[in-house]
Image (cartoon, rainbow, N blue to C red):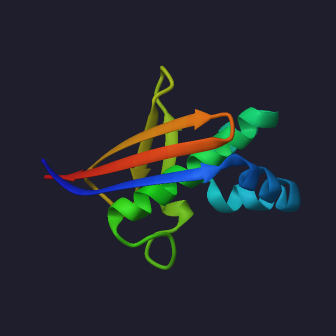
Amino acid sequence: MSVRGIGIDILDLDRVKRLQEKLGDRFAKRVLTPNEFEKYKEYKGQRQIEYLGGRFSSKESFSKAYGTGLGKEVGFQDIEVLQDEIGHPIMTSSKFSGKILVSISHERKYVVTQVLLEEG
């Protein structure tokens, strides 16, 4: 395996909260895939903000590792972050067929994510 790219992102959860309050489910549905949105609806309050922020930030990290940023070539719906049976995040993307490693970490006000893309 060889490293294709690495990306990191930090996000202020207050920003996510403001967008959620202003746009409601429209913001969440823009960022989250249908599967992610189903999980999002199970949460309330701060945990819901953390979940949404974690997905937003991890998709940003993926796009940086991929080398394009979010936009025309890679969008939110091209990347999905679900959890395995014990809660570890599992990232998949229709844009990348190699191995994707993702880490999501929350601290009261921030979420930090890192993505490593491996090929071969």
Residue depicted at x 50% and y 59%: 60
In the picture as drawn, the residue positioned furthest to the bottom comes out as 72
Q: Position of residue 76 (x, y in %)?
A: 55, 62
Left or right relative to 49: residue 110:
left
Residue 89 showing in the rendered view: yes
**What residue lies at 71% left-to-right and 57% top-to-bottom?**
29
Q: Residue furthest top?
A: 86
Which image quadrant is residue 95 in?
bottom left
Q: Residue 93, how many percent across, how many down?
A: 41, 56
Q: Is residue 36 left or right of residue 1?
A: right
Q: Residue at x 49, y 39 (%)?
A: 104
- Residue 101 placement, left or right of 15: left
State the image quarter where residue 44 is shown.
top right
Q: Position of residue 45 (x, y in %)?
A: 82, 35
Nearer to us in this view, 77 or 11:
11
Q: Residue furthest right?
A: 22
Residue under the point 40% across and 42% down: 102
Q: x%, y% of residue 17?
A: 78, 50
Residue 102 vs 33, above or below: the answer is: above
Report the label total.
Answer: 0
| Residue 25 visible | no
Above or below 25: residue 81: above
